Image (spheres, grey):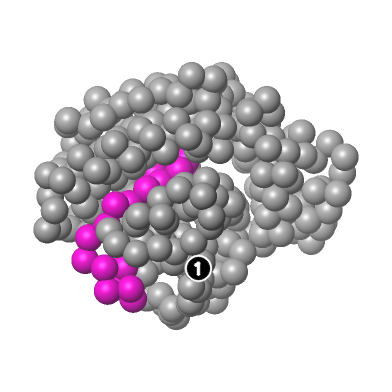
Amino acid sequence: MSLVPKSTGTFRSFDGTRIYYEVRGEGFPIVLNYGIGCLLNHWRHQIKHFSQNYKVIAYDYRAHHRSEIPEDHGQLTVDALAQDLKALLDHLEIQKASLWGHSFGVQMLARHYDLYPDFSHSLVFINGFVQNPLHGMFGSDLTTSFFELFKSGYQFLPETLSYLWKRSVQNPLAIQLSALAGGFNLQLTSLKDIEIYARGIAGMDLDAFMRLFESMMHYDGMPVLSRVQAPAIIIGGKKDSVTPQKHQEEMHHHIKGSDFFMVPYGSHCTQLDMPELVNLKIERFLRSTIKKNPTE
């Protein structure tokens, strides 16, 4: 299976921030939304597979990689990202699409659905959450304490911590630590994918990352789920220590009629761990929803 050629572009969102996107394939539109600090590479298996028969759209969030950091750092919020997605759909003249989210991308899609429900033909949630994921992450609440400590340190020593943030990827232990923090399964995920992730997150502006991260911690999308009318499938990993199975079960419980599947041995990045299995589950779900709603 060869990779379908891509077209690229940018557009200015609601506040003038320039957003980068890529389009591959033709047909029914799919829009991919990655996790905070992630890259388009997190979707590489899905892009290659689904662009054979669908129009697959991937893009960088504001303050991520090839998209701009907004001039007003107050616009580094879950709400702003939800508005960027709506602006992307408007720019591409898409009235309805299958919207897929991984990790933080699920939380952002919950907010997007809350604001713009008519754009969602169907929803694919992978290793996601809709509330502060730090509670219980890795089996304890130490992650929350670590973030608050890091935030306090950044307020006093922003340049020093920004320097260490960017230099950390050159440390021999950085790849292993990035794998743990990013929830990768080292036995299943390619080391190259982990290296790309480590370099990508280290290249982000630290202030922008922390502002988005704090907005993520404060947003609660749970009340939205009971109002979801679009078909949804929820996929998780049985070995996911970042967003454990309880997150997936709660979303499945609240979204009436949703499909649910846990990937055996899957980590926080099941779409990279076992792409063939994940793609198969999504393909069946997607075909079913399009068959039921062919004109939408």
Q: Is residue 243 above or below residue 95?
A: above
Q: Say which of 217 and 69 sits in front.
A: 69
Drawn side of residue 257 relative to residue 155, left or right: left
State the image quarter where residue 223 is shown: top left
The picture places residue 57, in percent across and down from the top left corner, at: 41, 61
Residue plotted at (51% across, 66% down): 5
Residue plotted at (22% across, 60% down): 96
User: Amino acid under label 1?
Assistant: Lys
Q: Residues within 10 Å of mark 1 (few under 14, many from 20)?
A: few
Residue plotted at (44% across, 66% down): 23
Residue 94 lies within the magenta run: yes
Residue 44 lies within the magenta run: no
The picture places residue 131, in percent across and down from the top left corner, at: 39, 37
Drawn side of residue 63 relative to residue 58, left or right: right
Tell me the element at label 1.
strand
Q: Is residue 96 above or below residue 233?
A: below
The picture places residue 179, in percent across and down from the top left corner, at: 69, 35
Drawn side of residue 205 relative to residue 227, left or right: right
Q: Which residue is mark 1?
A: 6
Residue plotted at (13% across, 53% down): 294
- Asked if one can make out residue 247 in the rendered structure from this viewpoint, the answer is no
Q: Which residues are magenta?
A: 89-108
The picture places residue 3, in percent across and down from the top left corner, at: 53, 57
- Asked if one can make out residue 54 in the rendered structure from this viewpoint, the answer is yes
Mark count: 1
Q: Say which of 296 and 254 sits in front.
A: 296
